[in-house]
């Protein structure tokens, strides 16, 4: 009877040990699943942040490019002409780099080509943009 009780006790201990082992395994699996879900959530959050950063950089570049455009409307009384001159200014190299502006005819006599040719020949330096605008209005 004693051997039967010892045997039963051993089996019961093994059963308890296997149950504890199962519980630990299940707990580890639940932890692992929770961690995997959190990792997936963080990966998704990272993707959204990267998209936001990319879009923000694109917007910043667009605004920077717009900031480098200077539009001046010029009225040339001598030729009765109205022009729009668009300067694309590189702020890092201004006034030492030559600027080739766009010249658009708005009203009256069209002297667009003459103005463009004349202001393109002005050398960079002090009052560079002002010199171009003054020449366009006085031409």
Image: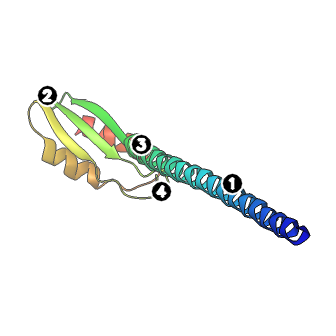
In-front residue for pair 81/64: 64
Pointer 2 with pointer 1, Cβ within 8 A: no
Whichever of labels 2 and 1 marks the residue nearer the N terminus, that label is 1
In the image: residue 63, left or right of residue 133: right
In the image: residue 39, left or right of residue 110: right
Which residue is farthest right?
Answer: 2
Whichever of labels 3 and 1 marks the residue nearer the N terminus, that label is 1
In the image: residue 115, left or right of residue 97: left
Residue 51 in the image: x percent, y percent? 44, 48
What residue is drawn where x is 28% and y is 41%?
86
In this figure, which residue is indicated by the disc labeled 1? 27
User: Pointer 1: residues within 10 angstroms few (<14), some, or many (20+)?
Assistant: few
Residue 79 visible in image: no
- Snapshot quadrant of residue 85: top left
In this figure, which residue is indicated by the disc labeled 2? 80
> Gap between marks 4 and 1, in whole Å?
65 Å
Residue 28 in the image: x percent, y percent? 68, 58
In this figure, which residue is indicated by the disc labeled 3? 59
Residue 47 in the image: x percent, y percent? 48, 51
In this figure, which residue is indicated by the disc labeled 4? 93
Whichever of labels 2 and 4 marks the residue nearer the N terminus, that label is 2
């Amino acid at each position: 009877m004693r051997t039967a009780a010892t045997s039963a006790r051993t089996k019961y201990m093994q059963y308890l040990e296997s149950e504890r082992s199962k519980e630990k395994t299940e707990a580890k699996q639940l932890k692992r699943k929770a961690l995997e879900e959190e990792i997936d959530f963080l990966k998704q959050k990272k993707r959204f942040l990267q998209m936001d950063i990319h879009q923000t950089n694109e917007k910043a570049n667009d605004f920077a490019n717009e900031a480098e455009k200077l539009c001046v409307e010029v009225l040339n009384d001598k030729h009765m002409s109205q022009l729009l001159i668009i300067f694309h200014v590189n702020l890092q190299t201004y006034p030492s780099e030559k600027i080739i502006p766009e010249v658009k005819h708005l009203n009256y006599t069209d002297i667009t080509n003459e103005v463009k040719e004349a202001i393109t020949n002005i050398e960079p330096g002090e009052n560079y943009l002002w010199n171009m605008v003054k020449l366009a209005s006085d031409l």
